Image (cartoon, rainbow, N blue to C red):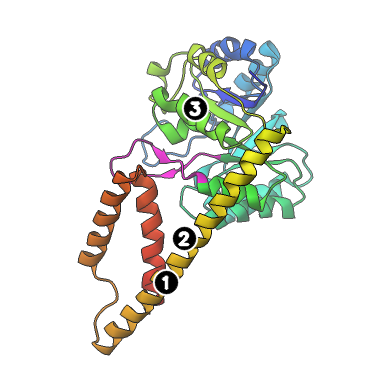
Amino acid sequence: MDRIFTIAGPCSAESESQLLRTAEALRDSRPDYFRAGLWKPRTKPGCFEGMGEKAIPWMQRVREVTGLRICTEVACREHVEACLNAGFDLLWIGARTTTNPFLVEEIATALEGSSIPVFVKNPASRDIVLWEGAVERLMAHGIKDIGLVHRGFPSFGETLYRNAPEWQAAARMRSAFPGLRMICDPSHIAGDSRIVPEIAQQSLDLGLDGLMVECHVNPGEALSDTAQQLTPEAYKAMLAGLNVRRSDADEDDYRNRLSELRSRIDVYDDAILDALARRMEISREIGRIKKEHNVSILQLSRWDEIMERALRAGRTKGLSEEFVRSLFEEIHKASAASQK
């Protein structure tokens, strides 16, 4: 298997023994960094919120014993200062913190003058501008070594994933910051260790540069995120089974076939845009009629009818429900805005 960038380790630092046992079990898989959360932002009080600064010497011991570089999540100035003073090798900003520009600014200020690599996870909300803004704040404070972590977005209702992948968000960030390394956190997307390898492979197929994977020497006894953590053995098996694709190929047959298929896609893209433009014109006409008769723009029964029809048609055409739903939600949002 070609070498990919990897960060691996437990969700939380629970004890020195737990960290050392996990790190020693991972050492021969050569992760670029060993991870563990010292401060754990939890949704509700009463949950395990990490060991805090008490765990810093444990992480330093991991590096001393195994030679692995160490990293953790930071959420405020105090976290940054403690980790810089302890000589951590990499830091990341978590999803909840990315959502808060005040905290990102505080972290960026604390990092000023440091050369430590900093990764930024996508925000917990579906606002990509917040992700872009967090990166731009770090850049504005002179932080040079910045990476991106795609960990998906919160799902509502019964879904396969803990956090919906929404790979289009990753594509947008890669387009906005083409020079930055982007890795995937399949543990938080999956929420279930059984499908972590599947998500990891999808991310590599889409050209992401590596993985941040939660691994615990005994996941069943973990104090946080029990279901999504791999054992070191399962992690190694996953790495061995991953197919890492080349970024490009020079063969004439490959380039000719790709060019022909891309030309066909361009034709379909033009047709899609033409159809959407005609649909929007009809929506505007519906809006004008509603105004004439003093009828409200949003009519939920009609929206339910549109969605049910689209999902039914999508199934017959082999399209995933998640894709069809997200597509028509965006179309509906634009149509409603055009009727105002």
* Residue 337 seen by the camera: yes
**Element under label 3?**
loop
Q: For label 1, count other residues whose C-alpha is less than 10 Å away and answer few (under 14), some (14-19) or many (20+).
A: few
Q: Chief secondary structure of the magenta span?
A: loop
Q: Distance between the residues labelled 1 and 3?
A: 50 Å
How far is disc 1 from disc 2 in space, using C-alphas?
10 Å
Instruction: Tell me, yes or no, whether the two marked residues, 1 and 2, touch with CB atoms within 8 Å.
Output: no
Q: Give the range drawn in magenta.
A: 150-167
At label 3, counting other C-alpha atoms closer than 10 Å, the crowd grade (few under 14, some 14-19, many 20 or more) is many
Residue 140 x %, y %: 73, 55
Magenta span includes 160: yes
Q: Mark 2 points at which residue?
A: 272
> Which badge, 3 or 2, comes first in the chain's sequence?
3
**Mark 2 residue element:** helix
Q: Considering depth in this image, is 296 or 96 the residue closer to the camera?
A: 296
Q: Is residue 300 above or below residue 292?
A: above
Which tag, 1 or 2, sits closer to the chain's start? 2
Q: Answer with mark 1 or mark 3, whichever residue precedes in sequence.
A: 3
Mark 2 belongs to which amino acid?
Answer: Ile
**Count of numbered circles in the view:** 3
Where is residue 257 shown, x and y percent of the image? 62, 39
Q: Position of residue 62 (x, y in %)?
A: 64, 16
Q: Residue at point 62% right, 41% down?
A: 258
* Secondary structure at numbered mark 1: helix
Q: Locate the N terminus and report the quarter of the image it occupies.
A: top right
The percent coordinates of residue 141 (x first, y second) are: 74, 52
Look at the image and say whether residue 187 sits in the magenta stretch. no
